[in-house]
Image (cartoon, helix red, strand yellow):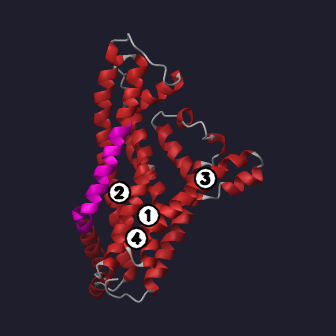
Amino acid sequence: MDTRTMFTNLLAAEWMKIARRPMALLLLGIFLALTILQQTLWFLVVALQEGTFSGGEVTFGLLSAAAIEQIKRQLSLPGVFGAMLSAINGTGGILAVILTAGIFGSDFNWGTLRILLTRAPNRGAYLLAKLVALQLALLAAMVITLITGALLALLFSSILDLPQQFRVIDLLLVPAGMLRALLVILPYTLIAAASAIFGRSVIAGVGGGLIFLAFDVSAGSLNTIGAVDPLIRTLVNLLLQPNINRLVVENSRMFGLDQSVLTSALDLNLLPSQWQAIIVIVVYSAIFGYSAYRTLSRQDIGGAS
């Protein structure tokens, strides 16, 4: 069997495993529920602020006018796409780490890896097939999320009487936003995969991925000290989190949102350029991906652990 055929068979098998995996469906359900809850809460904030339920007789001054305007954009088209992509790179990133750990660690926990490598001994093809299947699954989840967000936008906009400013160009920008969101998640899924392979278990993958994510978010708070000195800013912007923030911000801007209005701690002037962000994220992803490959290629694969 040549390498291409081996990879194709492995990819088809991995896709079927993910599609039928209860964990994947559960995580998707949790994410959609949290996203719907978040949008509903924003809807209630606007409704209470403007007295929608009382015919304008009873209003609440919950947020500033600028903040309410941003929320309205998140609740209508095309701004809802930016809000959904931000949720994907937030809560969705955490759930993607858990899914990745399950995909890579389960073969060790169930003792099926040795059987798989007996039939398809190319470990590089095995690793690549899993990673490609995972990215395809994440893209499918993004499509479902964006459709859900659009339906919510139509519902909430009709209740709040919000104007729809949707254009054809906005629809054409959605694939670019999805790819950018996928790039944001990539390094975290790769470190989770490397951790699962190194620790030979799902728990190791979840632990390694979430610990790195927590550390990275904490390190990202150092971005504020970048205002002290340009050299410090340059060094801080070599960390992963500031570059992640830049791409998340760009996705929001692409659909007319300004995250700095709702997140006062986010100083957009301290973030690196978009091209630097892409390069830095690709470098981190390459390091984590290579670590996963080297660890897998050198392991003595046993049965169930």
Labelled pair 4, 1 in contact (Cβ < 8 Å): no
Q: Nearer the viewer, mark 4 or mark 3?
A: 4
Q: Residues within 10 Å of mark 2 (few under 14, many from 20)?
A: many
Give the residues drawn in magenta, as a range: 16-38
The tag earlier along the polypeptide, 2 or 4, is 2
Secondary structure predominantly adopted by residues drawn in magenta: helix
Residue at x-position 31% and y-position 82%: 113
Residue 76: x %, y % from top left: 37, 30
| Number of other residues with Cα within 10 Å of mark 4, as a class: few under 14, some 14 to 19, many 20 or more | some
Q: SS at mark 4?
A: helix
Secondary structure under the numbered disc 3 in the rendered image = helix
Image x and y of residue 172, in percent: 38, 41
Q: Is mark 1 on a helix, strand or loop?
A: helix
Between the C-alphas of marks 2 and 1, the distance is 11 Å
**Which residue carries the number 3 mark?**
220
Q: In this view, does 72 lie above or below 279?
A: above
Read off the residue under disc 2. 138
Query: Which numbered tag is attached to residue 189?
Result: 1
In the displayed orientation, state which residue is furthest to the top. 57
User: In the rendered structure, which amino acid carries the disc numbered 3?
Assistant: Gly
Is-magenta flag for residue 26?
yes
Report, in whole angstroms, how far the alpha carbon at label 4 lies from the one at label 3.
25 Å
Kindly check if marks 3 and 1 are in contact, taking CB atoms under 8 A apart as contact. Answer: no
Q: Name the residue under label 4.
A: 203
Image quadrant containing the C terminus: bottom left
Q: Nearer the viewer, mark 2 or mark 3?
A: 3
Q: Would you say the residues marked 4 and 3 are in contact, meaning their CB atoms lie under 8 Å apart?
A: no
